[in-house]
Image: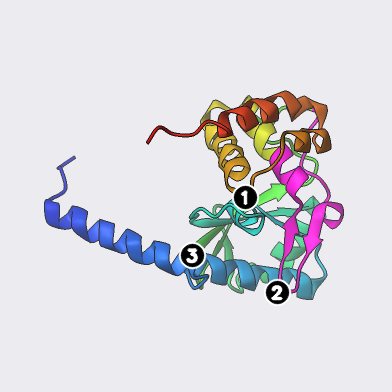
């Protein structure tokens, strides 16, 4: 693979800056895709909860993302596909959970209630019913903070390729000043990991 030229690197850098500005101004394709998805799910009466990086942003820690994570039941996913496949959405591949918003060019990653985060193996923490786990706002239904943190911790604890989920919790603690006592709101399965990350978040980088 050829090394990119200085001009190509600079072009990518400028494009990344433009994308970041649109993202944090809530004007990018990801936000448009999330809003369109929420409107369609609400209109169809399908319970859902926005999860992942966009839920982190709703709870106080914003980072860029290129996709939309949404929690559905299996029935909800089947209903959504029946109503909207070929009408703004396509499957990543035939029969897949994952979808793509064709208008905005954004991947929609589907999390299924009852499945397990991280390595997918049975554990005390599972993806909950979105009808019970979502916090309803004026335009979106967002995964509640304790549930979001539990899922992130359980994922990062059991899947080596998901260490970013632990980093997300660390940055969420640091940014929003979550307390050590917040651990008491979490499933015992993930409490020790939360406390470890909370302690790490109290460390200040040297000047």
* Image position of 15 with respect to 40: above or below: above
Residue 91 percent across, percent down from the top left: 58, 58
- How many residues crowd mark 1 within 10 Å: few (<14), some (14–19), many (20+)? many
Nearest to the eye among marks 1 and 3: give it: 3
As measured in the structure, the alpha-carbon distance from the residue carrying label 3 to the one carrying label 2 is: 21 Å
Protein image colouring: rainbow
Q: Which residues are magenta?
A: 124-150
Position of the C terminus by quadrant: top left
Picture quarter containing residue 130? bottom right
- 54 or 88: nearer the viewer: 54
Nearest to the eye among marks 1 and 2: give it: 1
Question: Which residue has dot 1 on it?
Answer: 52
Q: Residue at x 61, y 74 (%)?
A: 87
Question: Which residue has dot 3 on it?
Answer: 24
Q: Is residue 139 magenta?
A: yes
- 177 or 134: nearer the viewer: 177
Question: Which residue has dot 2 on it?
Answer: 39
* Image position of 96 with respect to 165: above or below: below
- How many residues crowd mark 3 within 10 Å: few (<14), some (14–19), many (20+)? some
* Image position of 140 with respect to 98: above or below: below
- How many residues crowd mark 2 within 10 Å: few (<14), some (14–19), many (20+)? some
Picture quarter containing residue 141? bottom right
Q: Residue at x 76, y 52 (%)?
A: 144
1 and 3 marks in contact (CB < 8 Å): no
Seen as rendered, the residue at the extreme front is 207
Q: Seen in the image, is 105 located left or right of residue 198?
A: left
Residue 4 percent across, percent down from the top left: 16, 48
Q: Residue at x 71, y 27 (%)?
A: 121
Q: Seen in the image, is 84 located left or right of residue 61?
A: right
Residue 57 percent across, percent down from the top left: 60, 56
State whether residue 122 appears in this view.
Answer: no
As measured in the structure, the alpha-carbon distance from the residue carrying label 1 to the one carrying label 3 is: 16 Å
């Amino acid at each position: 693979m050829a090394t990119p030229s200085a001009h190509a690197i600079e072009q990518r850098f400028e494009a990344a800056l433009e994308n970041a500005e649109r993202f944090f101004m809530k004007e990018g394709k990801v936000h448009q895709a999330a809003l369109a998805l929420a409107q369609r799910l609400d209109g169809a009466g399908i319970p859902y909860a926005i999860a992942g990086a966009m839920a982190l942003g709703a709870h106080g820690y914003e980072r860029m993302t290129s996709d939309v994570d949404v929690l559905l039941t299996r029935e909800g996913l089947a209903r959504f596909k029946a109503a909207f496949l070929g009408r703004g959405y396509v499957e990543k591949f035939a029969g897949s959970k994952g979808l793509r918003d064709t208008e905005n060019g954004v991947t929609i990653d589907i999390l299924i209630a009852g499945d397990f985060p991280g390595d997918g193996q049975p554990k005390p923490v599972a993806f909950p019913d979105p009808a019970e786990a979502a916090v309803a706002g004026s335009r979106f239904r967002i995964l509640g903070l304790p549930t979001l943190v539990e899922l992130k911790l359980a994922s990062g604890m059991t899947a080596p390729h998901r260490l970013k989920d632990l980093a997300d919790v660390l940055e969420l603690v640091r940014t929003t000043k979550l307390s050590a006592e917040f651990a008491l709101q979490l499933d015992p399965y993930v409490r020790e990991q939360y406390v470890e990350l909370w302690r790490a978040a109290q460390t200040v980088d040297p000047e």
